[in-house]
């Protein structure tokens, strides 16, 4: 499969250089999925409907309850136990209506996937559907979102600006979490990073580039145009792309679009893949919208990195995740 850059130019697999694969112990295996939309419909109270949640509830009853299935998430959990990735990245919309009961349910689900050091979460717009009490919602997942101890601030995190961007380093891999989740008015699902977070992100990108780490940015909203509609866009995507054009990153993972989206973005070292995952709980009206998990094998190779991507796609006929497409590409390392 060829990547499609944001300018529409196709890159053939023949144009991507491959080096000799080193020993297996040098591999880092990352699983990425997104948008599980876990709900607690039975625990909704009438007072919860005096806001945007009414629209979310109606959409669930009229459409999404047949689309997002708990049994698919159960199958995903079993598949991850067989795959045994070194780390899991989840790019937002873990809840559907940002209810405190949903956050508690998601917490139990996260614990079934792995420890907080093995799973990294960034929130999505559905997780910030309305303004909520931090201590009854996002505090439930705090240990799955925070930076490694040495990169944390000294004061407790009580807001997104206190917490993001986050940095977790696993060997030669830097996992960078960016938050785009913001409460919106009905019919809008836009996201924004904000100047404060962008400034801190610049420092992290510059630092990790100097350390020659393979940087993986997890973000909910796609950072390039043409993937989602205007009402679902990332408002400050141009500012983020400007930052990446200067400091780069080796891989960008996102969700939000509820479909597969394979693109690239220009950075100083060349082109960086921008990989979007559909909902992890979706039966899918079309094949590209069917639940998927992407498994990345990242291998240090010469002056850069070999990356192998294997799709795991939910099969409604087999009631489990099965192998999908595979692709491989080379990512040059940033200059120190």
Image (tube, rainbow, N blue to C red):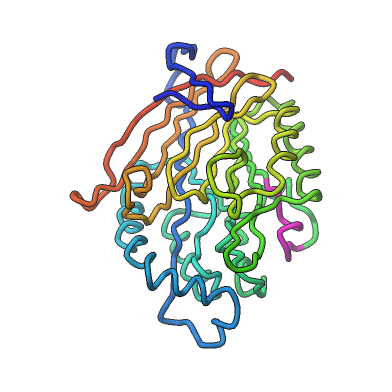
In this rendering, position of residue 274 left or right of residue 13 = right
The quarter of the displayed image where residue 20 is located: top left
Q: Position of residue 263 (x, y in %)?
A: 52, 32
Residue positioned 37% across, 56% down in the render: 281
Q: Position of residue 305 (x, y in %)?
A: 54, 21
293 in relation to 11, above or below:
below
- Is residue 158 a member of the stretch shown in magenta? yes
Residue positioned 36% across, 55% down in the render: 282
Residue positioned 32% across, 58% down in the render: 74
Q: How many marks?
A: 0
In this rendering, position of residue 200 left or right of residue 72 = right
Q: Residue furthest bottom?
A: 46
Residue 110 visible in the current orientation: yes
Q: Position of residue 66 (x, y in %)?
A: 32, 65
- Is residue 136 a member of the stretch shown in magenta? no
Residue positioned 46% across, 53% down in the render: 114
Q: Nearer the viewer, residue 149 or 98?
A: 98
The quarter of the displayed image where residue 222 is located: top right
In this rendering, position of residue 127 left or right of residue 16 = right
313 in relation to 134, above or below:
above
Q: Which of 13 and 302 is in front in this view?
A: 13
249 in relation to 95, above or below:
above
Q: Locate the N terminus and report the quarter of the image it occupies.
A: top left
Q: Where is residue 290 in the image (x, y as percent from the top left)?
A: 34, 48
- Which residues lie in the magenta part? 156-166
Q: Nearer the viewer, residue 106 or 56?
A: 56
Q: Locate the C terminus and report the quarter of the image it occupies.
A: top right
Residue 26 visible in the current orientation: no
Q: Residue furthest left?
A: 317
The quarter of the displayed image where residue 132 is located: bottom right
């Amino acid at each position: 499969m060829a990547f499609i850059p944001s300018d529409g130019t196709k890159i053939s697999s023949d144009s991507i250089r491959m080096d000799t694969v080193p020993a297996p112990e040098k591999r880092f295996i990352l699983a990425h999925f997104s948008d599980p939309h876990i709900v607690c419909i039975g625990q909704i109270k009438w007072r919860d409907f005096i806001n945007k949640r009414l629209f979310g509830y109606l959409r669930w009853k009229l459409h999404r309850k047949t689309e997002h299935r708990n049994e698919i998430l159960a199958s995903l959990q079993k598949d991850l136990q067989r795959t045994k990735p070194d780390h899991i990245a989840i790019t937002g919309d873990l809840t559907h209506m940002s209810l405190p009961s949903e956050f508690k349910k998601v917490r139990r689900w996260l614990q079934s996937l792995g420890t907080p050091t093995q799973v990294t979460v960034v929130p999505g717009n559905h997780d910030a559907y309305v303004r909520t009490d931090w201590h009854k919602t996002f505090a439930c997942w705090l240990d799955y979102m925070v930076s490694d101890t040495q990169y944390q601030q000294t004061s407790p995190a009580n807001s997104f600006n206190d917490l993001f961007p986050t940095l977790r380093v696993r060997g030669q891999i830097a996992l960078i979490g960016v938050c785009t989740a913001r409460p919106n008015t009905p019919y809008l699902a836009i996201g924004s990073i904000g100047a404060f977070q962008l400034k801190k992100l610049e420092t992290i990108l510059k630092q990790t580039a100097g350390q020659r780490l393979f940087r993986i940015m997890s973000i909910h909203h796609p950072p390039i145009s043409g993937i989602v509609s205007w009402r679902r866009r990332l408002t400050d995507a141009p500012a983020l792309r400007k930052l990446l054009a200067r400091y780069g990153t080796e891989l960008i993972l996102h969700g939000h679009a509820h479909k597969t989206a394979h693109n690239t973005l220009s950075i100083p070292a060349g082109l960086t893949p921008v990989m979007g995952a559909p909902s992890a709980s979706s039966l899918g009206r079309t094949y590209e919208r069917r639940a998927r998990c992407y498994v990345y094998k990242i291998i240090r190779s010469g002056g850069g990195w070999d990356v192998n991507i294997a799709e795991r796609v939910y099969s409604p006929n087999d009631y489990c995740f099965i192998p999908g497409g595979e692709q491989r590409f080379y990512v040059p390392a940033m200059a120190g």
